[in-house]
Image (cartoon, rainbow, N blue to C red):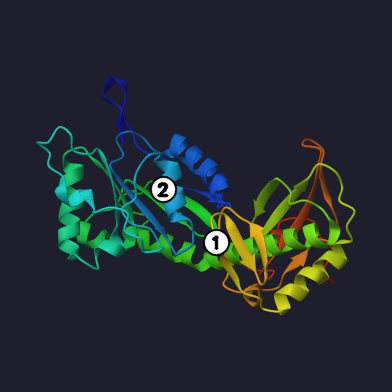
């Protein structure tokens, strides 16, 4: 809520906004920067972040708040002692923005201790970014000014007393994250097959669709999409392991692939459900690009082909 001239008051009209959660740190940084510009203000002191392990919460926070050092991440590596507990409002050199991972902190502190530390900081005009906000919401006694959840999509909400509430957003992103993991894994396997079997370099541009991925090509690839789909499905059927193997690198069975979102994958290819390719190249007359579109999951679960004209493709 903000004051306008002549004593009038403007009440926030944003209920929530939904964005694709891109795969790979660079794309996620770009989306986070856009979200920060659109939805965050200097007076937002309590920010709640929610999502499962591997969903990209840490990357999202770094994009929303460049330069903010995280005290902990989903890999369980403690980067530094949590400075929030040492906050002293009388200290002119005390921090102005704090990050705290509620799940990690609750292994060492009582809920009331963490809640008191958060409330003390925001009462003195400091900003606190709370990861796993749903775990500390009830102990705080009130909602965050901005809630951000990340699963297959990024949900940004500015709650009122009527909600949205963190548990509801957490339930949504936890339910949809599996599609993002499957789509990212299928995307990397598809790129690997294109490079190894067709000598087509990994396309520099990737896009996102619901329950799927888009590969962008400046020229129409000389590829039979039926054949490509069968090759990718064969690797999926082998149930090969997928895992990070170094900085910005992922292993797919015995092969390695560059990837900037190494944790956003299923653990093995057999967990990719119902992979398929649209059996035609889509051409964008504005960007002059050809698109290869891959999908996972089932129709009726919000898949992309439910929204576009693909009559007769899957008879």
> Which labelled disc corresponds to residue 264?
1
Q: Is residue 74 left or right of residue 144?
A: right
Decide if residue 305 is in sight here: no
Q: Is residue 18 left or right of residue 127?
A: right
Decide if residue 294 is in sight here: yes
Between residue 198 and residue 17, name the one nearer to us: 198
- Residue 262 to residue 2: above or below: below
The quadrant of the image that shows the N terminus is top left
Q: Which residue is mark 2?
A: 61
Could you tell me which secondary element the residue under label 1 belongs to? loop
Residue plotted at (15% across, 32% down)? 92
Contact, mark 1 vs mark 2 (Cβ under 8 Å): no
Percent across and percent down for residue 240 are: 66, 76
Percent across and percent down for residue 178 are: 56, 68
Q: Is residue 164 left or right of residue 306?
A: left
Percent across and percent down for residue 123 are: 16, 42
In the rendered image, which quarter is residue 257 located in? bottom right
Separation of residues labelled 1 and 2 (CA atoms): 16 Å
Callout 1: 10 Å neighbours few (<14), some, many (20+)? many
Residue plotted at (73% across, 61% down)? 192
């Amino acid at each position: 809520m903000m004051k306008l001239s002549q004593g009038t008051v403007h009440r926030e009209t944003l209920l929530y906004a939904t964005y694709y959660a891109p795969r790979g740190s660079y794309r996620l940084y770009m989306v986070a920067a856009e979200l920060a510009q659109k939805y965050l203000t200097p007076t937002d002191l309590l920010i709640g972040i929610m999502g499962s392990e591997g969903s990209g919460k840490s990357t999202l926070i770094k994009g929303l708040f460049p330069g903010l050092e995280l005290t902990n991440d989903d890999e369980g590596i403690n980067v530094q002692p949590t400075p929030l507990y040492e906050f002293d409002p009388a200290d002119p050199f005390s921090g102005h923005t704090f990050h705290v991972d509620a799940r990690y902190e609750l292994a060492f502190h009582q809920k009331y201790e963490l809640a008191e530390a958060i409330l003390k900081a925001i009462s003195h005009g400091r900003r606190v970014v709370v990861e796993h906000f749903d775990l500390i919401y009830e102990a705080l006694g009130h909602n965050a000014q901005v809630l951000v959840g990340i699963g297959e999509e990024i949900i940004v909400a500015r709650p009122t007393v009527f909600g949205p509430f963190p548990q509801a957003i957490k339930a949504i992103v936890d339910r949809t994250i599996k599609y993002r993991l499957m789509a990212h894994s299928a995307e990397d396997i598809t790129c690997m097959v294109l490079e190894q079997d067709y000598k087509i370099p990994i396309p520099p541009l990737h896009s996102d669709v619901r329950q799927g991925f888009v590969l962008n090509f400046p020229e129409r690839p000389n590829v039979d999409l039926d054949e490509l789909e069968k090759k990718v499905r064969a690797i999926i059927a082998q149930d090969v392991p997928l895992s990070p193997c170094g900085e910005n690198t992922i292993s797919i069975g015995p092969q390695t692939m560059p990837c900037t979102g190494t944790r956003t994958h299923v653990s093995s290819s057999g967990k990719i459900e119902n992979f398929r390719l649209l059996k035609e190249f889509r051409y964008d007359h504005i960007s002059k690009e050809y698109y290869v579109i891959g999908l996972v999951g089932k129709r009726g679960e919000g898949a992309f082909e439910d929204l576009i004209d693909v009559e007769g493709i899957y008879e």
